[in-house]
Image (cartoon, rainbow, N blue to C red):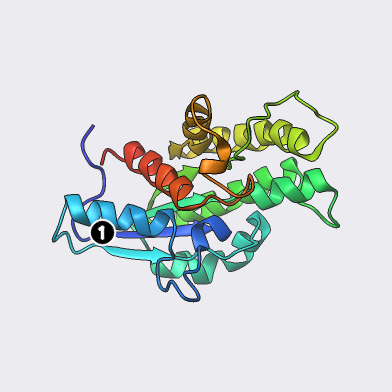
């Protein structure tokens, strides 16, 4: 598979805290997470391509937030590629019983809406990074506990992302499969302090999975 990103292209990343990773504070402008790692690895292997990299992640965001800021933080940039990672806050709010959560049907409708706008109002190719949860608990295990409910709910939200990727011809990045493969040999604590936010090793695994999907 050839490397899909071309010389001079603009690539925009958008999502929640995993994408943000300090890009608005001490780690401007790309953050200290997988986005920065993706950029560094691409520019190391393919120097001099004069590409533009934009990180528009904001911690705590759900797909509702992306919908509200889609024009300012995505459409106006007119990128050649957009990489979207969204869903873990939607899932957590729904599983935890937060006030006014984003249930699966709304998640799908709003996600479909921003992808439709992306296709109609820009020429960008789409990369959807599926939500993930770094735990060895699998769907059906200890369903009465929070981690078990998260694992079960993740299946629902992930299937939505898969359907939308097929609908819009998007490249699909699957961090959960990459983490599960590691967890057969390594403890989750090597990748995170808690199941939502990866440490540097977890971000590197996401970056590697993302790069594999685009033929790096």
Q: In the image shown, does 14 or 175 lie closer to the viewer? A: 175
Residue at 53 percent of width and 50 percent of height: 198
Residue 92: x %, y % from top left: 73, 48
Residue 162: x %, y % from top left: 55, 33
Task: Please tell me whether mark 1 sits on a helix, a strand or a loop.
Answer: loop
Residue at 62 percent of width and 60 percent of height: 67
Within-10-Å neighbours for mark 1: few <14, some 14–19, many 20+ = some
Residue 44, quarter of picture: bottom left
Residue 110: x %, y % from top left: 65, 51
- Residue 74 seen from this side: yes
Q: Is residue 106 above or below residue 16?
A: above
Residue at 66 percent of width and 43 percent of height: 108
Tell me the quadrant of the picture where the N terminus can be found.
Answer: top left
Q: Indicate left or right for 199 with 144 as reference.
A: left
Residue 210: x %, y % from top left: 39, 43
Q: Is residue 88 above or below residue 78?
A: above
Q: Indicate left or right for 208 with 63 as reference.
A: left
Residue highlighted by disc 1: 9
């Amino acid at each position: 598979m050839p490397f899909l990103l071309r010389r001079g292209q603009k690539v925009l990343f958008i999502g929640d805290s995993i994408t943000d990773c300090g890009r608005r504070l001490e780690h401007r402008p790309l953050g200290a997470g997988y986005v920065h790692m993706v950029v560094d690895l691409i520019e190391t292997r393919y120097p001099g391509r004069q590409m533009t990299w934009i990180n528009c992640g904001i911690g705590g965001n759900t797909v509702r937030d992306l919908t509200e800021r889609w024009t300012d933080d995505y459409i106006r940039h007119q990128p050649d590629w957009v990489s979207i990672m969204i869903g873990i806050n939607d899932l957590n709010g729904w599983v935890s019983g937060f006030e006014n959560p984003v249930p699966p049907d709304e998640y799908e409708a709003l996600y479909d809406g921003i992808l439709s706008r992306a296709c109609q109002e820009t020429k960008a190719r789409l990369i959807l990074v599926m939500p993930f949860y770094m735990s060895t608990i699998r769907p059906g295990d200890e369903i009465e506990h929070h981690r078990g409910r998260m694992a079960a709910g993740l299946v629902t939200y992930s299937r939505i992302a898969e359907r939308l990727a097929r609908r819009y011809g998007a490249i699909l990045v699957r961090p959960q499969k990459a983490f599960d493969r590691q967890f057969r040999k390594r403890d989750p604590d090597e990748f995170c302090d808690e199941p939502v936010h990866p440490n540097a090793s977890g971000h590197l695994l996401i970056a590697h999975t993302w790069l594999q999907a685009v033929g790096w």
